[in-house]
Amino acid sequence: MAEREENERLFSENHHDRRNSGRMSPLLDPNHLLHRIIVLFFMCFLGFGSYFCYDNPAALQKQIIQDMQLNTSKFMQLYAWYSWPNVFLCFLGGFLLDRVFGIRLGTVIFALFVCVGQVIFALGALLDHFWLMEFGRFVFGIGGESLAVAQNTYAVNWFKGKELNLVFGLQLSMARVGSTVNMNIMGSVYDHMKAVLGQTGYFTLGSALMIAATTCVLSLLCALVLGFLDKRAERILNKEQGKTGEVIKLKDVKDFPLQLWLIFIICVGYYVAIFPFIGLGQVFFIEKFNFSPTQARLINSIVYIISAPASPVLGLMVDKTGKNIIWVMCAVITTLLAHMMLAFTFWNPWFAMVILGLSYSLLACALWPMVAFVVPEHQLGTAYGFMQSIQNLGLALISMAAGAILDSKGYLILEVFFCACICLALIAVVGLYFLDFLRGGELNFSAATRARLQKTSSAESE
C-alpha cells in the first residue's frame, strides 16, 4: 500500500513538472531548442579563457624573453609546466568529475584553477619572479585539460541524440577562435600598456597578462551559470547529473593491441612538431622572413584560424569516406612537406602554413576516432586517457628540447628536428597500414563497408 502511494506521488510530481514545462516560455524550458541554444552559448565560452591564455607565451614570445631576461630554453618551460600535470590528470579528470565533485562543482573548480593559475602567472611577471610564472602555468594546466572534459560532458548531457556532432564542432571552433584572438591582440595589449605606463619591462608584461586573465574570469562565470542552468533542468526534468562515462583501468594497458601503440606514436610524433613550433613561431617569421610583429602574429595563428571552420568539414568528409589510415598518412606527409618548405626555402610561408593548418585539422578528424576501432568499448576510457597522457609527456619533453636546440643550434636545426619527429610519425603510419592490412584492414575500411559490416553484426546479434 505504501509503495503504491509512493508511486502515485512520483507520477503526480512528474506529471506536474511536464505540465509546468509545457506552460514555460521557450527561453526557460530545458526541453526547448531556444533554451538549449542559450546553454550552448555558455558551453562554448566555458573554454574560451583557457584556450585564449594557453598560448599567451607564444603571442608574447619576444616580450617575455626580453622583459624576464630569459633564453629560449627557459621560455619553453612555460609550455612544459602546463603539460606536466596532465600526464597524470588525463586519467583522473573524468573520475573526479564523475565520482568526487560531480559535473557542476567539478567544472567550477577546474575553471577556478584556470583563473587562479593565470593570475599567478601574471603576478610572477609583475613581481619579476620567473619561478612564480612557472608555478602559475602548472596550476593553469591542472584546470585546463580537465575543463575541456567537463565541457564535453555538458555537451553530451544536453545534446545527446539531438545536435551533438554540431555542438562538438562549434565548441572546437570556439576554442580555435580563442587561440586566434590571443595570437592577434596580445601584442597590441602589451603595446597599449607600454604606452600607458611609459616603459617596457616585467611590470608592463605582467599588466598585459593580468588583462588576459579577465577571459578566465569570463570562463568561471560561464561555469557558474551552466551549473545553475543544469541544476534547474535536473529539477524540472527529474534527470540525473551528467557524467563523463569514462572508465579508467590501468590494468587494461597490458591488453592494448600493437595497432594502438602505433597510433600513440603517430599522436606524439605529430603533435610535438605542431604546438612547440607555434610556441616559437613568431620570432621565427620575424627573423627568417623579415615579417613585422603584426604579420608574424597573424601567420603564426593561421593553423588555428583554418582549424576553426575546417575541422567540422573535414570531419564530415572522413565520416562519409572512411579510409582513416589513408587520411592520416596524407596529413602526416603534407605536414612534413610544410615543415621542409619552412626549413629549406624562402618561399612565402603563407602557403606552407595553410597546408599545415589543413593537415592539422585532417589528422585530428582521422586519427582520434581510430582508437574506437582497435579496442573494445570498456577500454576506451583507458585508451584515450593513456593517449592524452603520452601526448602531454611528449609535449613537455619536446618543448624543453626545442628551446635548448634553438638556443644552441638555431631555427634551421630546430626545423630539421621537427621534420625528424614527423618522419617518426610517418614510419608509424606506414607500419600501421601494413599491420592493419595483414589483420583484415578494418582501420582502412570505407564508410560504406563499415556500415554494411555493422548492419550485418547487428542482424546476427538479434
Image (tube, rainbow, N blue to C red):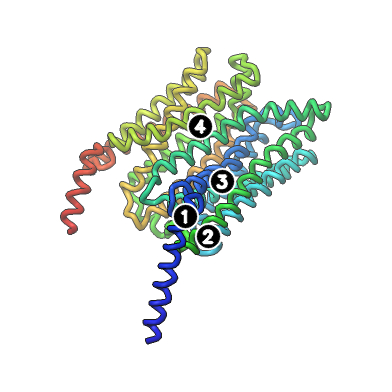
The quadrant in which residue 53 appears is top right
Q: Secondary structure beneath disc 1?
A: loop
Residue 342 in view in this figure: yes
* Residue 100 coordinates in the image, percent (x, y): 54, 64
Q: Secondary structure beneath disc 2?
A: helix
Cβ atoms under marks 2 and 1 closer than 8 Å: yes
* Residue 87 coordinates in the image, percent (x, y): 53, 49
Q: Which residue is mark 2?
A: 232
Q: Nearer the N terminus, badge 3 or badge 1?
A: 1
Query: Disc 3 versus disc 4: distance between alpha carbons?
Result: 24 Å
Residue at 46% in and 26% down? 356
Residue 126 to residue 150: above or below: above
* Quadrant assignment for the C terminus: bottom left
Cβ atoms under marks 1 and 4 closer than 8 Å: no
Q: Which residue is mark 4?
A: 274
Residue 410 in view in this figure: no
Residue kind at label 3, given as amino acid type: Leu
**Side of 220 relative to 129 (left or right):** left
Q: Which residue is mark 1?
A: 30
Task: Please rate how many residues cluster around mark 3, counting C-alpha atoms within 10 Å: few if below 14, some from 14 to 19, many from 20.
Answer: many
Residue kind at label 1, given as amino acid type: Pro
* Residue 166 coordinates in the image, percent (x, y): 41, 41
* In this rendering, the label closer to the viewer, 4 or 2: 2
Q: Secondary structure beneath disc 4?
A: loop
* Residue 141 coordinates in the image, percent (x, y): 60, 47
- Number of numbered discs overlaid on the protein picture: 4
Which mark, by number, is residue 46?
Answer: 3
Q: Nearer the N terminus, badge 4 or badge 2?
A: 2
* In this rendering, the label closer to the viewer, 3 or 1: 1
Q: Nearer the N terminus, badge 3 or badge 2?
A: 3
**Side of 159 relative to 151 (left or right):** left
* In this rendering, the label closer to the viewer, 3 or 4: 3
